[in-house]
């Protein structure tokens, strides 16, 4: 919902360029073909609005007030983000292993590596293995302040015979429990925090 005003302005930009300094009415009078362009543009906007009316209405009903940016009931990634906000500092990076991009968005935390899940390796085989291997290398090298992993992926990672990554994860992280389909792991006591945590970015 917060993006709708911005999208509306972007949608109106072509009309603004078409109107120019003289105004849209004057352009239609001098060039009737402009009216055809405006009609086509209006048809597209109305069609898109009609196709998405149900989704817009649902999003609107989820708001506690017309001016609110949050929902009546937080989404799973919002609940995960709230817990990450409690467990980590804002300048500390995290990593989400699994499909939950909203967790980064609402936690306001940076990612230590690219997105990777076990499904990609299963779907594409060896051609996708570099994604997982690259993510594991970054995670072990940068030590995120929190490692978020889906409840289905963690058992797969830890399943015998265990990989070096699974042993490293078990030695360095402890599980804080499940939060709406995701486990949140944080460094065990005595394990150094992420290297990036020692350098706080300047306030803006």
Image: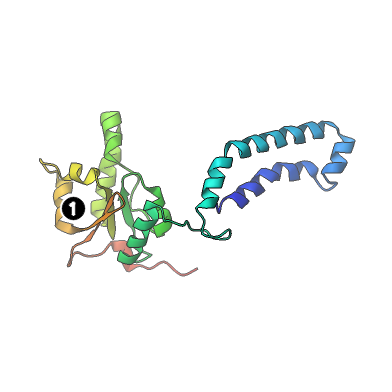
Q: Residue at x 18, y 53 (%)?
A: 169
Residue with the most extreme right position = 30
Q: Residue at x 23, y 52 (%)?
A: 140
* Residue 126 image offset from top left, x and y in percent: 25, 30
Badge 1: residue crowd in 10 Å (few <14, some 14–19, many ≥20): many
Residue 139 vs 47, above or below: the answer is below
Task: Determine the secondary structure under disc 1.
Answer: helix
Q: Is residue 10 left or right of residue 151?
A: right
Q: Residue at x 27, y 41 (%)?
A: 132
* Residue 43 image offset from top left, x and y in percent: 70, 34
Residue with the most extreme left position = 161
Q: Is residue 92 visible?
A: no
Q: Mark 1 highlights which residue?
A: 169
Q: Is residue 90 left or right of residue 32?
A: left
Q: How is the image coloured?
A: rainbow
Residue 121 vs 147, above or below: the answer is above
Residue 47 vs 114, above or below: the answer is above
* Residue 163 image offset from top left, x and y in percent: 14, 43
Q: Quadrant for residue 107, please give it.
A: bottom left
The answer to which of 192 and 48 lies nearer the viewer is 48
Residue with the most extreme bottom position = 203
The answer to which of 7 and 47 lies nearer the viewer is 47
């Amino acid at each position: 919902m917060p993006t709708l005003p911005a999208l509306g302005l972007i949608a109106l930009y072509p009309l603004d360029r078409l109107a120019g300094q003289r105004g849209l009415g004057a352009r239609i009078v001098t060039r009737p073909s402009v009216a055809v362009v405006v009609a086509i543009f209006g048809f597209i906007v109305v069609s898109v609005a009609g196709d998405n009316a149900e989704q817009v209405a649902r999003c609107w009903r989820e708001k506690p007030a017309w001016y609110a940016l949050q929902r009546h009931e937080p989404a799973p990634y919002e609940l995960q983000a709230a817990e990450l906000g409690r467990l980590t500092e804002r300048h500390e990076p995290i990593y989400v292993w699994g499909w939950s991009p909203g967790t980064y968005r609402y936690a306001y935390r940076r990612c230590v590596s690219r997105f990777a899940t076990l499904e990609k390796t299963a779907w594409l085989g060896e051609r996708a293995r570099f994604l997982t291997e690259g993510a594991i290398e970054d995670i072990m090298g940068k030590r995120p302040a929190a490692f978020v992993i889906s409840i289905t992926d963690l058992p797969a990672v830890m399943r015998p015979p265990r990989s070096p990554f699974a042993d490293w994860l078990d030695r360095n992280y402890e599980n804080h429990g499940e939060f709406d389909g995701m486990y949140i792991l944080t460094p065990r006591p005595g394990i150094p925090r992420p290297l990036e945590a020692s350098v706080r970015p300047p306030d803006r």
